């Protein structure tokens, strides 16, 4: 809309598709204790090791609050579909974005769309990011991988 270049590829992770939606009771503007309790109840989003360390928790809270503020206050404005591919990463046990909901990203591109299901829940990155990194690389640098494969076949 603003005339800026489009992305080469849009990757979304643990994100429901954009649409005007009403959220459950907003958490982002609650006092810290209520915010933490709400995030834990809704998303189980803060590891127990962090909860046990008040100094680390104090450092983490602004980022978690900013993320939730963006999510809870975002207002979707319909427009033309993107022309770049979209890949949606979702945890198999994600109660927020969910495998079924990820298909809602499909209408947002006139190009390729795929859902990649990873082990875990909404915070699937906790279980390791090797498969995620491999998927990103395959989609971002296929020509490099193809050239490497060609070089191996040529030298064999």
Image (cartoon, rainbow, N blue to C red):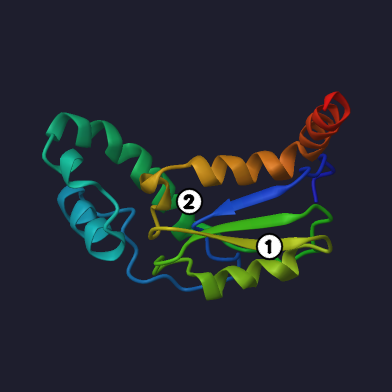
Horizontally, residue 44 falls left or right of residue 69, namely left
Horizontally, residue 70 falls left or right of residue 54, namely right
Residue under label 1, please give it: 114
Q: Quadrant of residue 138?
A: top right
How many C-alpha atoms fall within 10 Å of the one at disc 2: few (<14), some, or many (≥20)? few
Of the pair 28 and 111, the residue shown nearer to us: 111
| Residue at 64% over, 43% down | 136
First along the sequence among labels 2 and 1:
2
How many C-alpha atoms fall within 10 Å of the one at disc 1: few (<14), some, or many (≥20)? some
Horizontally, residue 50 falls left or right of residue 75, namely left
Instruction: Kindly check if marks 2 and 1 are in contact, taking CB atoms under 8 A apart as contact.
Output: no
Horizontally, residue 59 falls left or right of residue 21, namely left
Disc nearest the viewer among 2 and 1: 1
Instruction: Residue 98: give x, y in percent of width and height.
Output: 48, 69
| Residue at 71% over, 56% down | 86
Tally of numbered discs: 2
Residue furthest front as drawn: 156
The residue tagged with tag 1: helix, strand or loop? strand
On screen, residue 145 above or below 91? above
On screen, residue 105 above or below 28? below
Residue under label 2, please give it: 70
Instruction: Residue 57: give x, y in percent of width and height.
Output: 21, 37
Of the pair 153 and 66, the residue shown nearer to us: 153
Kindly report the distance in space between the C-alpha atoms of the residues bearing marks 2 and 1: 24 Å
Of the pair 139 and 76, the residue shown nearer to us: 139
Q: Quadrant of residue 121?
A: bottom left
Residue furthest right as drawn: 154
Residue 58, labelled with which disc? none
| Residue at 42% over, 70% down | 23
The residue tagged with tag 2: helix, strand or loop? helix
């Amino acid at each position: 809309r603003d005339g800026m270049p489009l992305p080469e590829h849009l990757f979304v992770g643990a994100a429901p598709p954009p649409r005007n939606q009403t959220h459950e009771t907003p958490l982002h503007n609650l006092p810290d204790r209520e915010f933490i309790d709400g995030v834990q109840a809704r998303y189980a989003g803060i590891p127990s090791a962090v909860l046990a360390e008040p100094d680390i928790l104090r450092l983490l809270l602004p980022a978690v609050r900013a993320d939730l503020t963006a999510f809870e206050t975002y207002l979707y404005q319909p427009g033309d579909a993107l022309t770049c591919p979209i890949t949606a990463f979702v945890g198999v046990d994600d109660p927020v974005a969910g495998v079924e909901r990820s298909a809602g990203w499909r209408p947002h591109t006139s190009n390729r769309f795929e859902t990649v299901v990873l082990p875990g829940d909404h915070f699937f990155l906790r279980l390791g990011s090797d498969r995620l990194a491999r998927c990103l690389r395959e989609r971002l640098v296929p020509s490099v991988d193809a050239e490497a494969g060609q070089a191996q076949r040529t030298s064999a």
